[in-house]
């Protein structure tokens, strides 16, 4: 599955910047490669919330590629990188991160820092439908107290985190924050009290325990 994603991205790059060599290897400093080319190096995996669906959601991960370029002149290498960045912005499934790569990452890769960006896209694996067991005994109905959980997810500067997946650990319940970073769970089993919450946003995960007896504000602090 990952090899198909590598091939797809390599083909897309080849169609975007003609006559450029595409490699999945780590960029190199010396000896300097000849011609023009693009290094598409798979740097890391990240968590990726599955899409909303009434079916059993697929397994999903986010692939994060380090994109760099080379050419006979710095100007041409910069042009190639800019063309790729703008083209990636036009593909709805792609997301790019233009923040500079930390110096310690370049040091770990044993490379001289250079212009680059991160290109991310999700890869999904469908799961077989869950087997449905027939009911073979009389239905027994038990009533339980019900409660709710209302809150907001905010980031640095108390800015709302939009579209974050909020899960109630252990209950297999989830929701997504709105434009104000708000989420709401109604009709939860059990009395109000401590709830273990998991936040998935921006390719990161954050677990926290909250007091569900009142509206909560969760400061998103991914580790």
Image (cartoon, helix red, strand yellow):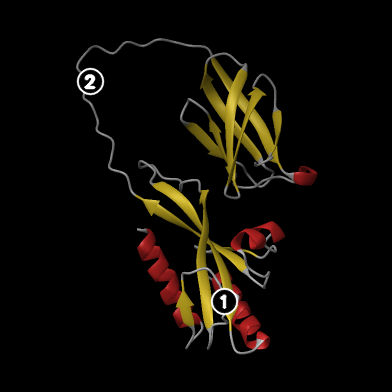
**The disc label shown at residue 154, or none:** none
Residue 78 visible in the current orientation: yes
Image coordinates of residue 85 in percent, x first then y, are: 60, 73
Q: Residue at x 68, y 36 (%)?
A: 152
140 relative position to 148: left or right: left
Q: Nearer the viewer, residue 5 or 33?
A: 33
* Element at label 2: loop
Residue 31 occupies quadrant: bottom right
Residue 178 occupies quadrant: top right
Crowding near the residue tagged with mark 1, few <14, some 14–19, many ≥20 C-alpha atoms within 10 Å: many
Relative vertical location of residue 142 with respect to residue 153 in this rendering, above or below: above
Determine the CA span between mark 1 and mark 2: 56 Å
Relative vertical location of residue 134 with respect to residue 59 in this rendering, above or below: above
Location of mark 2 (residue): 135
Image coordinates of residue 1 in percent, x first then y, are: 35, 58
Could you tell me how many numbered marks the image carries?
2
Image coordinates of residue 10 in percent, x first then y, are: 43, 73
Image coordinates of residue 73 in percent, x first then y, are: 64, 89
Q: Residue at x 48, y 69 (%)?
A: 25
Q: Nearer the viewer, residue 210 or 175?
A: 210
- Mark closest to the chain's N terminus, 1 or 2: 1
Q: Quarter holding the C terminus?
A: top right
* Element at label 1: helix
Residue 92 visible in the current orientation: no
Crowding near the residue tagged with mark 2, few <14, some 14–19, many ≥20 C-alpha atoms within 10 Å: few
Q: Nearer the viewer, residue 191 or 120?
A: 120
- Report the mark closest to the observer, 1 or 2: 1
Residue ranking furthest to the right? 157
Q: Residue at x 57, y 76 (%)?
A: 84
Q: Nearer the viewer, residue 86 or 162?
A: 86
Location of mark 1 (residue): 84
């Amino acid at each position: 599955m990952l090899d198909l994603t590598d091939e797809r991205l390599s083909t897309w790059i080849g169609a975007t910047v003609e006559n450029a060599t595409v490699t999945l290897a780590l960029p190199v400093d010396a000896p300097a490669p000849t011609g023009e080319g693009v290094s598409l190096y798979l740097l890391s995996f990240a968590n990726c919330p599955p899409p909303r669906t009434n079916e059993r959601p697929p397994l999903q991960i986010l692939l994060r590629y380090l994109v760099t370029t080379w050419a006979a002149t710095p100007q041409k290498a910069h042009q190639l990188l800019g063309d790729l960045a703008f083209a990636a912005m036009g593909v709805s499934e792609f997301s790019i991160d233009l923040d500079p790569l930390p110096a310690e990452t370049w040091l770990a890769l044993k490379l001289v820092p250079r212009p680059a960006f991160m290109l991310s896209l999700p890869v999904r694996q469908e799961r077989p439908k869950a087997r449905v067991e027939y009911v073979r005994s009389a239905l027994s109905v038990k009533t339980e107290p019900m409660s709710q959980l209302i809150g907001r997810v905010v980031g640095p500067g108390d800015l709302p985190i939009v579209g974050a997946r909020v899960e109630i650990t252990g209950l297999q319940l989830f929701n997504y924050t709105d434009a104000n970073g708000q989420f709401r769970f109604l009709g939860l089993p059990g009395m109000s009290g401590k709830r273990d919450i998991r936040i998935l946003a921006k390719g990161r995960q954050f677990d926290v325990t909250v007091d569900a007896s009142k509206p909560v504000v969760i400061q998103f602090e991914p580790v």
